Amino acid sequence: EKGTYPHYMMKEIEEQPFVIRKIMSEYSDENGNMKIQPEILEDIRNCDKLYIIACGTSYHAGLIGKQFFEKIAGKPTEVVIASEFIYNMPLLTEKPLFMFISQSGETADCRAVLVKVKQMGYKTLTLTNVKGSTLSRESDNTLLLYAGPEIAVASTKAYTAQIAVLAILAAVVDNKIDINIFKELGKIAYSMETLCDDKDNYKLLAEKYLKDSRNCFYIGRSMDYFVCLEASLKLKEISYIQTEGFAAGELKHGTIALIEHNTPVVAVITQENINLNTRSNIKEVKARGAATLVISMRKLSQETDEIVIDDVNELLSPLATIIPAQYLAYYAALLRGCDIDKPRNLAKSVTVE
Ligand code: F6R
């Protein structure tokens, strides 16, 4: 039930801090340490490469998961869109492990890959929000997301749940950089709450930048780039504004031709090593008339940045930066009179290929 919330999407956005805490409690042992089923750890440690298969928002979470597995656990990882894998299978290593990420656990594109790799005799693991779902039943092992039912078609809390579970999983497999995931996730949950408290600001920004816009660009580098892909999908699917999320460094290779007077460009900046370069991309689009909106992390922020998030671990920053982006999409859709929870042409679980 959505209770006092005007839409499921808002309810689900605001549940995210609780979902992070729920995940931390579900994935801890009696001493409060991170815990994952031993057979899953064994499969990941034994494989020579992880192949993450997913669609849409879950694919975007997978792109972030790859960073966790490679940077935290030192495990080579490739992320493939399920519907592409079928035609364009990457050259597989000797001992691959297939990981499916699916909120619903019912996505036909993922299931087609699952059936295929099982026939080939490979091990499989599913991350899903739905216990007993098709992908969960048919794969060797399952990790649950504990996000609670997600009703709005646009995925919000399942995305952050996927990222949180992926971070925990990577760190339990191997923690080469000695990151304290629980401590960092605790900070994230708190920061999410602070961000949710600022929603009036996001509404004003949506009104100023998006209400009457034809298009919108999201730019970022590294972890921020992956968030831009998801922020862009969120905005387009519920507000019908044409959007694009791309690597800030790619602007000058073509897309900058689309920047006109008042074109909204949202830039995300959370990492020290990309700050200066993304800032100069902002200047470039501004010089061509773009209306820029900056989401930055406090330690890197400038006075004119429209949205500032608390300092959190850079690798986990997508969990925080996606919150204002979800609200911007929500308010843009609201102000444009769109059906937020049930956007046109879309279904919550996609059971055709
Ligand atoms: C976007 C969205 C979709 C799903 C995609 C995969 O907000 O919800 O892009 O992420 O259809 O669905 P699942 O995760 O159920 O496999």
Image (cartoon, helix red, strand yellow):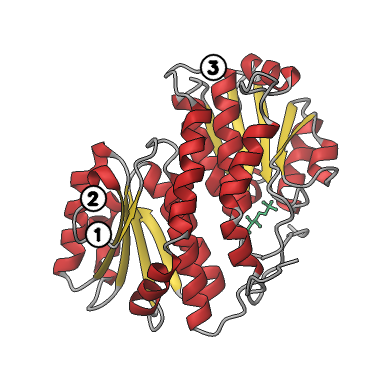
User: How far apart, in angstroms, are the residues tagged by discs 3 and 2?
Assistant: 33 Å
Q: Which residue is mark 1?
A: 305
Q: Is mark 1 within 8 Å of ligand 1?
A: no
Residue under the point 73% across and 22% down: 37
Q: Which residue type carries mark 2?
A: Ser
Q: Which residue is mark 2?
A: 301
Does residue 116 lie above or below 34 as drawn? below
2 and 1 marks in contact (CB < 8 Å): yes
3 and 1 marks in contact (CB < 8 Å): no
Which numbered disc, 3 or 2, marks the residue that appears first in the sequence? 3
Q: Quadrant of residue 299?
A: top left
Give the camera-side residue of 26 and 266.
26
Residue under the point 71% across and 46% down: 110
3 and 2 marks in contact (CB < 8 Å): no
Is 329 displayed left or right of 299 in the figure?
right
User: How far apart, in angstroms, are the residues tagged by discs 2 and 1?
Assistant: 6 Å
**Residue 141 drawn at (x, y percent):** 78, 29
Ligand 1 falls in quadrant: bottom right
Is 38 displayed left or right of 165 in the figure?
right
Helix, strand or loop for disc 2: loop
Q: Which mark is residue 174?
A: 3
Is residue 114 visible to us here?
Answer: yes
Mark 3 is surrounded, within 10 Å at the Cα level, by few (under 14), some (14 to 19) or many (20 or more) other residues, namely some
Helix, strand or loop for disc 1: loop
Q: Nearer the viewer, mark 3 or mark 2?
A: 2
Which residue lies most toward the left here?
287
Give the camera-side residue of 85 and 39.
39
Q: Nearer the viewer, mark 3 or mark 1?
A: 1
Residue under the point 58% across and 51% down: 16
